Amino acid sequence: MLVKNVYIRVAANFLTAAINFIPLILIVKVFGAELWGQVIYYYSIAGILSIFAELGFFTAYNKFLAAEDDFKDVATFFVIRTTLILLYILIFWGSLYFKFKNSQFDSGLLKILFLAILLELIAQFFSATMTGKRDFLYLSTVEVISAAVSFVYIIFVCYTKTNIYFLAYSQSVVPLVTIIGGFFYFKSRGLLKFYKPTFNDYKKYISYSLPLAFSSICERLMSYIDKLVLGNLLGPSEVGFYQIAQQCYGGADRFIKPVTTTIFTEIVHRIAKAESFFHKGFKDLVEVLNFVGGLMVIVIIFASKDIIQIFFGVENLRAAFILQFFSLTIIGRLFWRPYNNVIFAIEKHKLISYLTPLSIAAMIAFYYLLIPVKIGQSFYLGAAALPITEFITWILPIGFLRIIYLKKAFGNIHMFEIICKIWLPLVIVVFSCVLIYKSILMLPAAILGFVLIEYFLRIVTIRRIQFLTEPIKQIFKDEK
């Protein structure tokens, strides 16, 4: 079931990424990087005001619903989520009146993107329920339909309504369709019923989420503040280049994030029943994930320039330079996220909050220090400083903190093996090929060299290939 659910999420996200890629090309071609960057800048302003809309309850909901599958959790989370959404509405309109009313900001554009964030917060309730209940096929179907509707809307805007306000409304399409799909999901699953949560229901959520609250605020803050700082320092054009690079990387992250999210709900079931899972099935998953991550890194490093030039034009090649630095993010997230899932599953997540204040302060300081760095007349880090900073100040220290705890709890956590067997060979292969010729022409050689090394190191094995392909074979058997 675990591998089957992972395949469902990967397939759906591959399709969603493919559907979303063409609209991105059209947006950049029709509106340009600077105007698209302006939309994203205002979106970040509206988003940063929602920093209190999470507070760790999302993780708690996924955990409890996956473990207990009780309708009480749905009702309790609905009340909590509604309360936090109302808080966001108050914060936004208060800020609009006191901060943005008589300023140079475009209040109309800001209101449109406030609506997008509001719909996203509502949509997350439905997607979280599908995830917690492990209805990944339904969730994936909703995501693909949402992407398709968004695709049609963006084509309409690009060819008939070339207006920044209509473009801004595109951010609302996916969450709106998700809400509609979520309503039908609740209706079909019999979840449209009433239950009044008790004090103990709220207490359970607060007790689990409280250690995560500050960390959640910081994470939500950091998901928007990077583009705000970038826009203030270098203007909307650099935000536009960064957004192109980020969305190209998003194609890779659409494989990473759903896989690790799917793994979390499965780990909740398995880790509680047998610790041996950590050293068997979990170890296999981590090694396979890291191997796939290595392939993604190779593609980004050797193909990013050609991808950007072909699809977005030579005038946006700046985005290719930024995109290459996202390989650090892939390495960090694929390596650390599965371990993070175990931390949450065994309810030892309090330790994550220890380094959060220091990491956030360091991250903001690094932004202002590295973004403006220039060498000569043409070279400057700019938006490339963002993934570098995230890796150094957030992914690396928080990841090591998780590893230290899990080493005490489970003994061997296989970290040294993964570094030596996967990431070290990857570095050797990439540097060797770059020294020969840094071009897309070296991509096949780099991939072949990496795969051969991993085969001899027994990361790629016949047993694992059979294990991973078994669900696909089963699908064809069921069809016959």
Image (cartoon, helix red, strand yellow):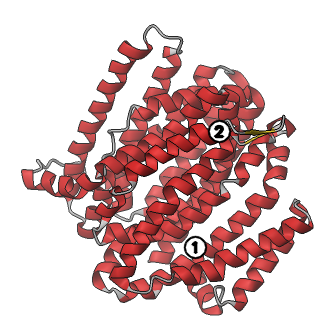
Q: Are there few (<14), some (14-19), or many (20+) residues within 10 Å of tag 1?
A: some
Q: Is residue 75 toward the left or the right of residue 88 in the image?
A: left
Where does residue 187 sit, x and y in percent of width and height?
Answer: 30, 50
**Vertical side of 366 occupied by 253: above or below:** below
Which residue is at 81% across, 60% downward?
302
Is residue 306 found left or right of 466 in the rendered image?
right
Q: Is residue 473 visible?
A: no
Residue under label 2, please give it.
371
The N terminus - image quarter: bottom left
Q: Residue at x 54, y 34 (%)?
A: 171
Q: Please tell me how many numbered marks the rendered image carries.
A: 2
Element carrying mark 2:
loop
Q: Which mark is residue 203?
A: none
Identify which amino acid the numbered label 2 is placed on: Ile
User: Which of the labelled discs sits on residue 289, or is there none?
Assistant: 1
Indicate the secondary structure of the residue bearing disc 1: helix
